[in-house]
């Protein structure tokens, strides 16, 4: 069975590096797909542009930065949840600070997890690694795309 | 015997009257005997003859002896009533059978009697006669021959039935012994005395027994001895005068042996006894009878005594057969009633008749005559006029009785009923008064019967409803009742009939004959018969139309006032011109009962018809020059205006309305001293508002002025507020953007510095010298510190910008929650906590908790150097504020720098002594300030510090 990808949506190269470092300890480096903003993320997910010819299949999890140029994390989350093909993909929102209003809107859109990037590197790697491990190795998602969520997405 | 019986009866009832009657009868008996003897045979004169004929006729008719008029040959030409009775034949029968049919022809004495009559002209003897039934009886007959007026010979026969006497004599004749026995054993005392010596010759057993003397004693006595001595003189005289009389009768007093005096009725005959002239005396003891008679007299006296005190009068009234009146018996009350005494009227009615009111006398007499004729009860009321008295009303009632002689007696009473008459009169007067109230009174009065029909209605009611009494009689009350009031009327009426209610009052409407509605107040009372059965309902009806109209007007005014008040209330709280104009317009139309209304605002030299409330608005949204319209005139002249007829105005001011349906107008300026507009109402009919209505409109306009002014004021304020608010919002947004970028953009590089420094330490530490590794560690520590600083700064900025979520909280609970948060970090420290009882406060839980966390954290931190930390949390009330404090025994501070204590990044101690960012107390101050309170601190270095903060005791606005 082919292992599913981990989609990391992050505009900051330093954070990308730190995140890859953190996730590498899970031996999943080859599964990580990095995109630099929301637009690129949607192109990947919908097989557009650069990703027209990519291998088919939804990622196991999307690590989604909140604050990005062009299209921010909240918009991506909204599009994913409104797309019948994508709505079952687990999304982990990753933010620099714990802003109440960001948390509320993310959860209103059906985010699966919301983590704050700690300044301390140990804590940062721990957070990224653990959530990556949970959503890629432990959590199960249906292959069948017919599933419909019982809850309604607001907005 | 028959006559006697009658008189005795009469005697019993009317002793006084009877005496007279008895005497009269006796007299007439004597006379009648005499008259037979004295029938005139010669014709002394025609007059005398007629008189004789009359007397004869009376005798013939009234005699108790049978009298027959015959012709000498034996024919009978007349028989009197007594004869008819004695023989049981009628006068006609007598004439048919003749003398031969009634006389026993075999009697030998007949022949000799007839011979003797022929010889002497008259004869007397005894003969046997036959009654019609064939029975034979002996009779004494006296017959005479006389000549009638034409000279023809006639005879008369007077026949007396002597059956008893004949039998007695027969027996006497039969034997001397039996005669003696007859004498001796006769139950009636009999005495025989010598007329010369007056000594008794014989007495019978009854006499012996009755008088008490023995036979021998009697025979040695004279008649004088049985008489009381005081009667002796009159007795002697009597004897002398009657010596030659054959038969004597009279009443005497005798004395018995025991000296008892008895009254005896004596009949004596002159006889010859043993050759001596003697008298045979029959004595009938009538003592008892006389006593009874005396008793009757006594009774009469008692009656008089009894009736003397009787105010009214009991009487016997007699109409004699000659038609005259008298009052033989009258009680003493006659004095009260007629002013005369009983004696006055015994034989005379005039003392009474002369005091009877002349107007009443003829009627009274007529009534008496009527009663006498028909023997019907007599009842009459008449007036009596007595001197010095008002007319008295007398009531009379009596029962008549016809006597054989044709006279009539009434027994009855008279009573004075003047007081009754007075009552009756006053009753009549009161009835008259009622009748006047009924007929002429101002209230309508009606009688309605069971079937709801009008029985009676007075003039006032007829006027009220416009129908005549005759018309009303064919109606039920429902017919003229307003349809809306009928059901109620029927309900009340049926309850009245059932008797569940006795009366009711209500207000209702009639429909008059002219079709107009009229309001009345009615009071209905049931009139029931004695058994409580409904007869009529009596209704008193008052016209309350005026009152109702006034009430209606009042109600209309009241409704309008309510509308006005509602509108004033509504516009006072309105914040927009639109809603004010709408309210004012609809209200103005309603309170003026107008077809439409306009809200006009002044715009410089123009009238702007800002709003119009009408089905088909005329000028909504249009503008006219002030000088061109009536509203402009009102605004410029600051006066109300009413135009009753827009066409009558010559000015151009009403030109606008010509050609529209508007006929009348009324306009009030809004704000009278400086009109900012006007309220205009208009009608499609000619109408002039009353002063009250105009006042209402002006009041509405005045209130509108205030409301509009308020709106302008509020609008100004709101504009300023919204300007300020938007400025603040911009500022706030910038702040937000700032803190957002701080958290994201400042923290990211820190994270990277820290991250990569650690990677260096972890992965490349062998490649670095010792000092290089130390530098890397310093970089890591500094980055961490900066991270904390940034977080604290963000927290601080948020306490200033986030909205307060105030509610009531228990301050003690907030302190305990904060303690639980901090205690673990206090570790193994030995701290003595004293927490006093704390009150309820009004504030934001999270922020107040942040206050306590900071304060407690501080206290814990600064007591660190003490062996035993002592921390006290308490509270006190100071006026209108609650003051909370936290006191520690820690390091304390120099009060000279107290004002710097709560500044951002201000520290009292070196970072090496006590860690911290210097943000905590700044946060406390900001939070307390935002709650409307204050913060301060007291301290001495090394003596501990007390931090205070206050909160308003009661929330300013809830």
Image: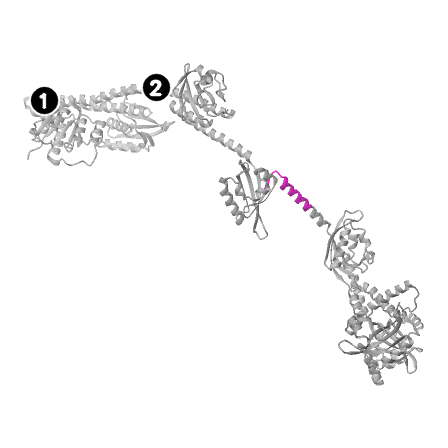
Query: Which of the numbered marks, if any, corresponds to residue B773?
Result: 1
Query: Which of the numbered marks, if any, corresponds to residue B922?
Result: none
**Left or right side of B348 for B435:** left
Question: Dot 1: what SS?
Answer: helix
A73 is within the stretch colored magenta: no
* On screen, residue B18 above or below B270: above
Query: Looking at this view, is B733 or B399 the one in front?
Result: B399
Classify residue B474 by image quadrant: top right
Residue B289 shows up from this direction = yes
Q: In the rendering, at what x and y percent does residue B486 appear? A: 50, 42
Q: In the rendering, at what x and y percent does residue B547 appear? A: 55, 34
Taken as a whole, is the magenta stretch helix, strand or loop?
Answer: helix
Residue located beneath label 2 in the image:
B719
Specify whether disc 2 shares its chain with disc 1. yes
Q: In the rendering, at what x and y percent does residue B649 appear? A: 49, 18
Q: Which residues are magenta?
A: B426-445
Between discs 2 and 1, the one toward the N terminus = 2
Q: In the rendering, at what x and y percent does residue B644 appear? A: 50, 22
Question: Pointer 1 indicates a residue of which chain?
Answer: B
């Amino acid at each position: 069975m082919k292992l599913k990808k981990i989609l990391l949506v992050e505009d900051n190269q330093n954070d990308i590096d730190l995140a890859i470092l953190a996730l590498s300890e899970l031996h999943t480096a080859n599964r990580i797909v990095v995109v630099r903003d929301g637009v690129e993320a949607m192109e990947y997910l919908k097989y557009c542009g650069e990703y027209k010819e990519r291998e088919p299949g939804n990622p196991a999890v999307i690590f989604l930065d909140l604050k990005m140029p062009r299209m921010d994390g909240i918009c991506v989350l909204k599009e994913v949840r409104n797309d019948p093909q994508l709505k079952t993909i687990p999304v982990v929102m990753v933010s620099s600070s714990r802003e109440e209003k960001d948390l509320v809107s993310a959860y209103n859109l059906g985010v699966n997890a919301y983590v704050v990037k700690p300044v301390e590197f140990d804590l940062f790697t721990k957070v990224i690694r653990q959530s990556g491990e949970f959503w890629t190795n432990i959590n199960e998602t249906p292959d069948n795309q017919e599933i419909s969520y019982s809850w309604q997405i607001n907005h | 015997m028959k006559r006697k019986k009658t008189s005795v009866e009469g005697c019993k009832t009317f002793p006084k009257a009877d005496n007279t009657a008895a005497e009269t009868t006796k007299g007439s008996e004597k006379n009648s005997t005499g008259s037979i003897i004295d029938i005139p045979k010669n014709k002394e004169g025609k007059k005398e003859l007629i008189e004789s004929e009359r007397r004869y006729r009376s005798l013939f008719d009234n005699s108790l002896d049978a009298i027959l008029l015959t012709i000498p040959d034996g024919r009978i030409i007349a028989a009197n009533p007594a004869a008819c009775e004695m023989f049981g034949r009628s006068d006609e029968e007598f004439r048919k059978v003749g003398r031969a049919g009634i006389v026993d022809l075999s009697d030998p004495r007949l022949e000799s009697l007839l011979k003797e009559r022929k010889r002497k002209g008259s004869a007397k003897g005894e003969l046997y006669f036959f009654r019609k039934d064939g029975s034979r009886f002996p009779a004494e007959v006296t017959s005479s021959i006389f000549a009638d007026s034409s000279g023809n010979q006639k005879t008369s026969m007077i026949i007396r039935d002597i059956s008893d006497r004949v039998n007695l004599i027969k027996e006497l004749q039969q034997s001397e012994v039996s005669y003696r026995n007859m004498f001796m054993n006769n139950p009636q005392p009999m005495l025989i005395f010598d007329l010369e010596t007056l000594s008794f010759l014989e007495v019978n057993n009854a006499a012996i027994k009755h008088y008490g003397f023995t036979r021998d004693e009697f025979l040695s006595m004279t008649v004088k001895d049985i008489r009381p001595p005081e009667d002796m003189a009159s007795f002697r005289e009597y004897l002398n005068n009657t010596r030659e009389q054959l038969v004597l009768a009279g009443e005497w007093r005798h004395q018995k042996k025991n000296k008892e005096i008895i009254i005896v009725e004596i009949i004596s005959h002159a006889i010859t006894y043993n050759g001596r002239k003697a008298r045979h005396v029959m004595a009938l003891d009538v003592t008892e009878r006389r006593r009874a008679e005396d008793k009757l007299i006594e009774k009469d006296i008692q009656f008089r005594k009894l009736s003397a005190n009787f105010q009214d009068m009991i009487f016997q009234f007699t109409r004699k057969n000659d038609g005259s009146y008298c009052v033989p018996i009258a009680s003493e009350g006659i004095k009260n009633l007629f002013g005369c005494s009983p004696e006055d009227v015994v034989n005379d009615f005039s003392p009474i008749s002369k005091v009877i009111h002349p107007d009443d006398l003829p009627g009274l007499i007529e009534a008496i005559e009527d009663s006498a004729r028909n023997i019907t009860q007599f009842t009459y009321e008449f007036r009596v006029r007595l001197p010095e008295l008002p007319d008295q009303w007398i009531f009379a009632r009596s029962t008549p009785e016809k006597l054989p002689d044709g006279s009539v007696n009434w027994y009855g009473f008279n009573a004075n009923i003047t007081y009754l008459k007075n009552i009756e009169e006053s009753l009549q007067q009161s009835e008259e008064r009622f009748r006047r109230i009924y007929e002429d009174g101002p209230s309508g009065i009606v009688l309605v019967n069971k079937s709801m029909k009008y029985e009676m209605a007075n003039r006032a009611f007829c006027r009220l409803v416009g129908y005549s009494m005759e018309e009303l009689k064919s109606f039920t009350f429902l017919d003229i009742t307003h349809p809306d009031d009928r059901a109620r009327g029927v309900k009340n009426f049926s309850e009245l009939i059932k008797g569940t209610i006795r009366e009711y009052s209500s207000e209702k409407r009639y429909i008059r004959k002219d079709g107009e509605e009229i309001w009345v107040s009615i009071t209905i009372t049931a009139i029931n018969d004695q058994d409580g059965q409904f007869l009529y309902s009596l209704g008193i009806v008052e016209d309350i139309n005026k009152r109702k109209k006034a009430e209606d007007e009042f109600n209309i005014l009241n409704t309008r006032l309510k509308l006005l008040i509602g509108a004033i209330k509504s516009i006072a709280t309105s914040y927009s011109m639109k809603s004010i104009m709408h309210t004012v317009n609809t209200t103005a139309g309603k309170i003026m009962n107008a077809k439409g209304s306009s809200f006009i605002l002044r715009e410089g030299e123009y009238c702007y018809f800002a709003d119009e409330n009408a089905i088909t608005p005329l000028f909504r949204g249009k503008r006219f020059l002030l000088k061109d319209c009536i509203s402009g005139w009102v605004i410029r002249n600051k006066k109300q205006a009413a135009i009753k007829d827009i066409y009558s105005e010559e000015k151009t001011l009403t030109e606008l309305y010509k050609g529209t349906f508007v006929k009348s107008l009324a306009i009030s300026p809004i704000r009278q001293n400086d009109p900012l507009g006007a309220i205009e109402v208009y009608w499609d009919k000619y109408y002039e508002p009353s002063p009250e209505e105009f006042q209402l409109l002006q009041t509405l306009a005045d209130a509108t002025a205030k409301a509009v002014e308020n709106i302008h004021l509020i609008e100004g304020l709101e504009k300023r507020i919204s300007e300020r608010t938007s400025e603040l919002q911009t500022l706030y947004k910038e702040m937000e953007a700032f803190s957002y970028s701080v958290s994201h953009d400042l923290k990211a590089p820190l994270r990277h510095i820290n991250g990569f420094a650690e990677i260096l330490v972890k992965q490349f530490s062998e490649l670095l010298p010792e000092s290089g590794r130390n530098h890397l560690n310093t970089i890591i520590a500094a980055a961490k510190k900066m991270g904390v600083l940034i977080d604290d700064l963000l927290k601080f900025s948020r306490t200033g910008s986030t909205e307060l979520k105030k509610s009531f909280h228990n301050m003690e609970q907030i302190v305990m929650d904060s303690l639980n948060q901090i205690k673990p970090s206090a570790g193994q420290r030995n701290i003595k906590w004293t927490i006093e009882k704390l009150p309820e406060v009004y504030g934001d839980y999270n922020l107040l908790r942040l206050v306590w966390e900071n304060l407690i954290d501080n206290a814990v931190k600064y007591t660190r150097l003490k062996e035993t930390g002592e921390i006290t949390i308490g509270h006190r009330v100071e006026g209108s504020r609650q003051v909370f404090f936290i006191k520690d025994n820690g390091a304390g501070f120099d009060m000279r720098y107290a004002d710097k204590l709560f500044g951002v990044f201000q520290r009292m101690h070196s970072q090496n002594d006590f860690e911290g960012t210097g943000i905590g107390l700044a946060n406390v101050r900001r939070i307390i300030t935002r709650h409307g309170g204050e913060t301060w601190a007291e301290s001495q270095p090394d003596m501990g510090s007390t931090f205070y903060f206050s909160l308003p005791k009661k929330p300013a606005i809830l």
